[in-house]
């Protein structure tokens, strides 16, 4: 059974087809990366899944519930979380307190806020920094904080928007490890990421968008050899 099902999804901005007739399903406990050139529609797709934007056409089902057109907070309550590229923490609060805010919101149902906070910190490899004020974190640590906050909402599906952008190779490797840990914990991850070596390494599956259309869908080893993908995005056949 799939955790997310997108069917015939389209989004037009005036004349521009930002997403056009896109269909795919996401299997639970997997990491799927959405790749494609700038302007391909990746962020728009996230905005549609989280309910931030209404689609022009099509349907989105999360765990067999139709979420199309639902308010963002209702979709979050069902267990969909998004980690933003630009983390905007409460700078005067500690890492723990920031992640705790995630644990206070998010998925509906009974919860143990302290335990949920600790689990978010642990999965995002932030336990050692729990008492540090957010204002003292590096860019890389802020990304981990944002992922921890998102997971602490008890999400079943994490949408991560370029979590490795601007990170150095060591920080990138640490973030990739975190994404793997998150998958191992049972959470499904959909990733938008430009860093191709990381994408190839961590993804169970790639979805390739080009000018709003889905041009490839499959395992990284297959998709990276697809001539349309190479032409649209990868630019070189040996990536
Ligand atoms: P990506 O994240 O793949 O770089 P986006 O989803 O941000 O692409 O953008 C896809 C296209 O839709 C682009 O041409 C962009 O300019 C346009 N677009 C995105 N959001 C809006 C919006 N809110 N209003 C008008 N056009 C938008
Ligand atoms: Mg984008």
Image (cartoon, rainbow, N blue to C red):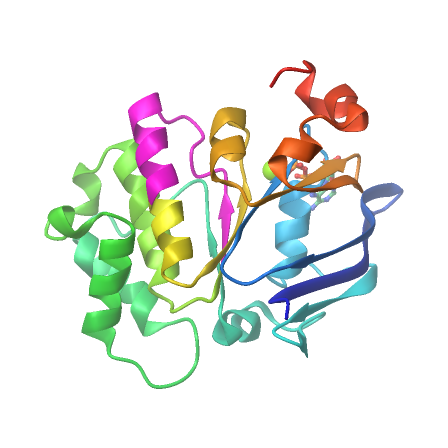
Asked where in the image residue 207 lies, by quadrant, the reply is: top right
Left or right? Give the position of 39 relative to 95.
right
Q: In the image, residue 88 lies at what x, y percent?
A: 36, 47
Residue at the bottom extreme? Answer: 110
Compared to residue 22, the image places residue 137 above or below, namely: above
- 110 relative to 47, above or below: below
> What x and y, as percent, mark residue 182?
38, 54
Q: Please tell me in which quarter of the rendered image ligand 2 is found.
A: top right
Residue 28 in the figure: left or right of residue 9: left
Task: Please name whichever residue, 64 or 59, is drawn nearer the observer in this view of the structure.
Answer: 64
- Answer yes or no: is residue 157 visible: yes
Q: Which residues are magenta?
A: 158-177
Q: Nearer the viewer, residue 102 or 66?
A: 66
| Residue occupying the point 19% across, 72% down | 114
- Residue 233 part of the magenta segment: no
- Lateral position of residue 58 relative to residue 128, left or right: right
Kindly identify the residue that appears in the image at 76 percent across and 24 percent down: 232
Q: Is residue 98 left or right of residue 46?
A: left
Q: Position of residue 236 (x, y in %)?
A: 67, 13
- Place of residue 144 in the rendered image (x, y in percent of width and height, measured from the top left): 31, 44
Please tell me which residue is depicted at 63% across the width and 44% down the height of the picture.
43
Q: Is residue 88 visible?
A: no
Q: Quadrant of the C terminus?
A: top right
Magenta stretch contains residue 162: yes
């Amino acid at each position: 059974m799939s955790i997310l099902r997108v069917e015939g999804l389209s989004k037009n901005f005036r004349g521009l087809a930002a997403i056009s007739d896109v269909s795919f399903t996401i299997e639970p406990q997997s990491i799927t990366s959405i790749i494609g050139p700038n302007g391909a529609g990746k962020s728009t797709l996230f905005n549609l899944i989280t309910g931030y934007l209404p689609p022009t056409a099509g349907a989105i089902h999360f765990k067999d519930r139709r979420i199309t057109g639902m308010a963002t907070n209702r979709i979050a309550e069902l267990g969909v979380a998004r980690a933003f590229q630009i983390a905007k923490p409460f700078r005067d609060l500690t890492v723990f307190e920031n992640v705790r805010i995630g644990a206070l919101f998010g998925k509906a149902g009974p919860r143990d806020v302290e335990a949920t906070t600790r689990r978010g910190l642990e999965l995002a490899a932030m336990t050692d920094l729990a008492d540090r004020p957010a204002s003292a974190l590096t860019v890389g640590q802020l990304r981990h904080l944002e992922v921890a906050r998102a997971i602490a909402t008890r999400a079943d599906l994490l949408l991560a928007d370029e979590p490795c952008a601007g990170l150095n190779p060591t920080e990138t490797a640490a973030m990739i490890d975190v994404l793997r840990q998150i998958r191992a914990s049972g959470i499904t991850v959909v990733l938008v990421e430009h860093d191709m070596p990381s994408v190839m390494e961590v993804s169970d599956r790639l979805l390739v968008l080009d000018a709003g259309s889905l041009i490839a869908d499959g395992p990284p080893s297959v998709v990276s050899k697809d001539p349309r993908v190479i032409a649209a995005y990868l630019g070189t056949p040996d990536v």
